[in-house]
Image (tube, coloured by chain):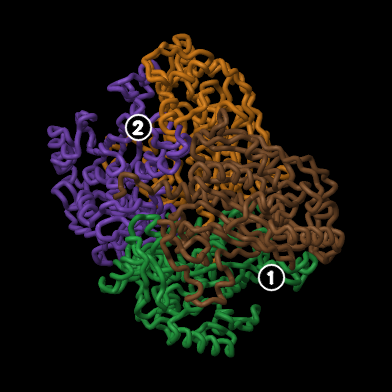
Chain colours: A green, B brown, C orange, D purple
């Protein structure tokens, strides 16, 4: 259970890090949307390991195949299945972790839940699982672009460990984040982040940070008033990503230091439209978008896989030690950027279709 | 849409702040659980306005009626419906907000979504909507207590504006929070918070803060690996509450300042069980509980309703001003404590039943 | 579980035959639809016992109250809750069935499932449970009328025991069925049915029959190709009604006696539109409406409650006998007509909203 | 939408008859169940075309690949994805049906729904879509066998056109149906059916019939009282299959000719258990299994694809004619048998897990 996301734009992912492959089925995509494998591949390439010297050097080609749901370059309205094959793995490489629970990984909790786990890699807890999300996100972005003329999602690295970037949230563009390997639009900060990541890698350690995301061009009216508030679904989407520990929208935790008279966003008429003067709400009021920029921040912990020797226990319940081998990301943040965008697109696309469902043209008046 | 929460322990709420009443239908509750109206009323009384001098002085009796699903004091396995009647309201009291969008309320976004709204009070965006959640949470707590011997949820106020409480997370008990009006177990901090709230009220302003929640007695194995991670469902639950702006679990945003070697939770054998030495994970690894304490924090913004005169626009799109009248909470935090507990119970109860569904006794071995 | 129906127009019912009441929550209804308690009451009155001398003489007033979701006579887009109170029952009347399983009722299977049951009447298995469905159906009919100009659902009794009515399916109107107590548009057959039901009642026995339903004004394109085919959802809807044993759409079981060359519905152009010459398909092809009349038939078994003495076993597992007392329907068919209509409306309204969700105006072309 | 079936044992299918392939994702399967590709292939081979001279002579190898969710021969508890590749098709073969709507196929209704269709074959309306269902059914059968010691599903052909088989429902076994090409346990009838199908093929026509299904070994207590009655979910499952027009459970439509005193199933104690004397209920009372045999019948219309020249219209809305070419099934019934079994297994497995979810051991007493 729990491998499906969305009510109307329904995304089901499958696949372990090892085995036949990773994939996704998207059910509920409107028909006649232009989609090609290249559209999906472009997004997959942004999350792929080995893109730059600061990410893991493992080479994974991750070529996607559209198995169904697209005909002559357009969606059919039927389920879109996308498959990415896994590379063959050497079973011997995993013999140690077959018998030892890696600290702050999911090995132990999977074992507790299922009484069995695929110990060749991380199974479903592997970051490879996000391939399906990114593929689906590429489709969702297309749908949103058809629906909303000026729609855009921009995510970027806002913090790595103690280095905090200065970014003008309201003007930053995708290309600003894409122009360096860290995906941080503040070039000076990006350089320091890159050095830090290199140094951390050399020390066999890891660091985390914050990804910030801003969405423009969403009309007022998306979201549901109670359990499926837009911010609730965004929070769930983000906390469902591996390694995330926190989420805040608009003013976020900083709101707790403000008074109502400072925090409230007064309304005004601007260029003939009802707008808010400030945007502490983060573009959402009462769970429903108000037409302002939606922005939020996601905290990622330092990667659990480190070269340091760590204390742990074995599957036979004996105290032991473990050191990760092989090549791993000392910092997942740069690769997390397209994943945060993808999950954001899934939430918004789902709510966009939900809003269409209740908008009866003939009832209006 | 969006008024149902949970996959197996399914909670559907209904009701506006004005009109016939507020209620909830709980579908999927196991049979033969002892429940009385008193069990539910006890929790409702904790969220009720007018409990103490620091909350709003509006008197709402909020007597609950169990309409169905309970027979001779025990659940039948059929839907449990609980209804709380609204007090009659005077239509004249709402004539101003019928025509003006209150800043940082949901008036404008509802209007954008539906083209209609119940302008007598907050409609579904009113805090009264949480009555249904608290009633359902009371039932969920009962189920969890039947399932898990040492189960307990303790939520408390950890911060109001700049005042931060010192609380020993691992020893705090429900009664520690309940012994003062602020629901803060740090008595000294509680007194300062109480003074601050009184002062803020006199100034016609409002403040927010942080509610912290700790859950004990949850076995390892609850939660789903991908989209329905335990922390994802908790994040959604919390961000679905009115006035929340942020959520963090375990180390949360502070994790971004740590290295992997500091953050990882090593495993050890303690009293014959596999345990973690530290608990930066917050009791959840890979989306699945690991048997440690689950703890998280929720940020609440300052209440939007303030006595200050505020700039806004009218429904006829003209610039205007608005001052709230009547009695309102200058700080929702004390009343948010039982609501946070209720949503936590809903998430855990749902995942507990989900875990039961796949645990085939005869398949084990 | 299992008390919610629909994906987008979501109906959740609650309530036992005895206890506080019976009700329904409708989530997902579009906003700004005109609905009054009178609209709902009109349909409830059609299913009410005691309408005529051929139905049970129990008097149940069944007044409905709209608790939420309607403001100034129009839907808000928020959950519509409708409540109908139960009459007080005398506990003593049920002492016998508390201890004996009634044949072909749900007493035993409930006990097997839940280990507990409300033995005061039929609990959730009572026909009273359909009150919620009929109330929701009244709302669904309103939505469908707003969406589709010529929409109409006509159900009627087509057979009682061996008496088979002759009805022109393509011209029959609601008022044709409503003009007699049996709800059979064939007046001659209706008179014979009425006599038969009277005679069966005198004999302390019961009879079943067939309700036929025809829907006009549904555009081509509703329904989903695979699991949620329109006929699949209709079949589920009908078999979820108490006392139903069969469902057939279009040619139904008679199709098994035809050859493909007789059964296929050729296409032709009629008044400028693509139409089928015959309609063995029953208005649905590949799970999707084709714009023709949708028609289907539902088999109802004879009522299980009869005055005859019957063999059964007690809850303490001893062989015993049981005779029903009090006033019961010797034939549920006349009262089933509005219930069949209601479930049909729920299915179609849900699929109508689902179709709206994927119809992107800007994608067309 | 509508490509997912089940609440807890959730099956999502994808794939058109032409394109990359057909597949299924099963989410919610309990862990540690033994499954191999051979288990799935065995069932797929039963539905495959070209098995015998009475089915279509098209050769489709339909080799399945388990892509995820199985490790060392056992389920992981994570999504099980199964993929079957399509053969390459020659585009030219479909040029005619690209431009003409085939009578009683889904071409026109798909076009009306989506404004686009994959005209290379039947798309999602193709019988190939059932591959995913059969693969999932193979897994569901395994789970049910682990749960219930004497569980068995036996489906068989009970009628082809006017030929009606005589089968002892309570003793018939899978091997009785499997021993001839028609899958009819009445050997004499099977021979006549086989002749008839051959003759019908020669005439370029088609016939339908009835598949009967009996399930043994299901304990009392499966099913939900209201919308998700066991018979309702079975009805939906069956009517979701291509070419089905009717469903009846237990006494079915024949119940309409009986009186309550004949139809009711008296309870008795038999070998120490509460049993019914007769079984007109078909093993389900009030939507919940009562421990008796569950049996039902499904009507299949004659195959829509026939060699006869038929009247139809073109996509450019002109009157035209069409004759099917190539090799097609004159009768789908023999291949429908494993598909009916598969859908039955999906329904029962889902309800078995749902029942586990609410059965709290510690609450009993």
Dot 2 crowding, Cα within 10 Å, few <14, some 14–19, many 20+:
many
Q: Is residue A54 left or right of residue D283?
A: right
Which residue does the numbered mark 2 point to in the structure image? D249
Residue B37 higher or lower than B264, as above or below: above
Q: Looking at the image, is mark 2 or mark 1 nearer the viewer?
A: 1
| Alpha carbon separation for disc pair 2 and 1 | 61 Å
Residue at mark 2: chain: D
Instruction: Say what secondary structure mark 1 lies in.
Output: helix
Residue sitting farthest toward the front: B271
Do we see residue A361 in this rendering?
no
Residue A38 vs residue A343, the one in the foreground: A343
Which residue does the numbered mark 1 point to in the structure image? A254
Residue C220 vs residue B339, the one in the foreground: B339
Q: Residue at x 53, y 63 (%)?
A: B282
Which percent across, then down, holds residue B214? 58, 56
* Residue C25, image quadrant: top right
């Amino acid at each position: 259970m729990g491998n499906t996301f969305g009510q109307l734009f329904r995304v089901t992912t499958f696949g372990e890090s090892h085995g036949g492959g990773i994939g996704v089925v998207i059910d509920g995509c409107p028909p006649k949307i232009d989609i090609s494998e290249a559209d999906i591949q472009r997004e997959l390439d942004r999350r792929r390991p080995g893109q730059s010297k600061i990410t893991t050097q493992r080479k994974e080609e991750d070529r996607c195949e559209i198995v169904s749901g697209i005909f002559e370059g357009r969606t059919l309205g039927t389920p879109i299945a996308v498959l990415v094959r896994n590379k063959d793995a050497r079973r011997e490489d995993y013999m140690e972790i077959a018998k030892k629970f890696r600290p702050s990984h999911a090995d132990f909790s999977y074992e507790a839940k299922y009484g069995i786990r695929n110990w060749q890699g991380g199974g479903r807890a592997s970051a490879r699982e996000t391939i399906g999300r990114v593929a689906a996100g590429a489709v969702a972005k297309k749908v949103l672009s058809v629906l909303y003329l000026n729609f855009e999602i921009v995510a970027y690295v806002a913090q790595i460990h103690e280095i905090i970037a200065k970014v003008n949230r309201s003007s930053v563009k995708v290309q600003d984040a894409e122009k360096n390997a860290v995906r941080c639009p503040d070039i000076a900060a990006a350089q320091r982040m890159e050095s830090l990541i290199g140094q951390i890698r050399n020390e066999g350690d890891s660091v985390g940070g914050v990804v910030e995301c801003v969405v423009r061009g969403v009309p007022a009216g998306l979201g549901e008033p109670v359990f499926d508030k837009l911010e609730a679904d965004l929070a769930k989407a983000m906390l469902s990503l591996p390694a995330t520990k926190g989420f805040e929208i608009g003013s976020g935790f900083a709101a707790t230091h403000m008074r109502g008279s400072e925090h409230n966003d007064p309304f005004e008429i601007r260029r003939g439209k009802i707008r808010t003067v400030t945007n502490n709400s983060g573009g959402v009021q009462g769970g429903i978008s108000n037409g302002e920029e939606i922005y939020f921040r996601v905290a990622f912990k330092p990667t659990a896989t480190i070269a340091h020797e760590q204390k742990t226990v074995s599957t036979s319940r004996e105290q032991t030690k473990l050191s990760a081998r092989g090549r791993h990301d000392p910092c997942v943040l740069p690769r997390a950027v397209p994943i945060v965008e993808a999950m954001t697109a899934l939430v918004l696309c789902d709510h966009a279709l939900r809003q269409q469902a209740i908008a009866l043209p003939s009832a209006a008046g």
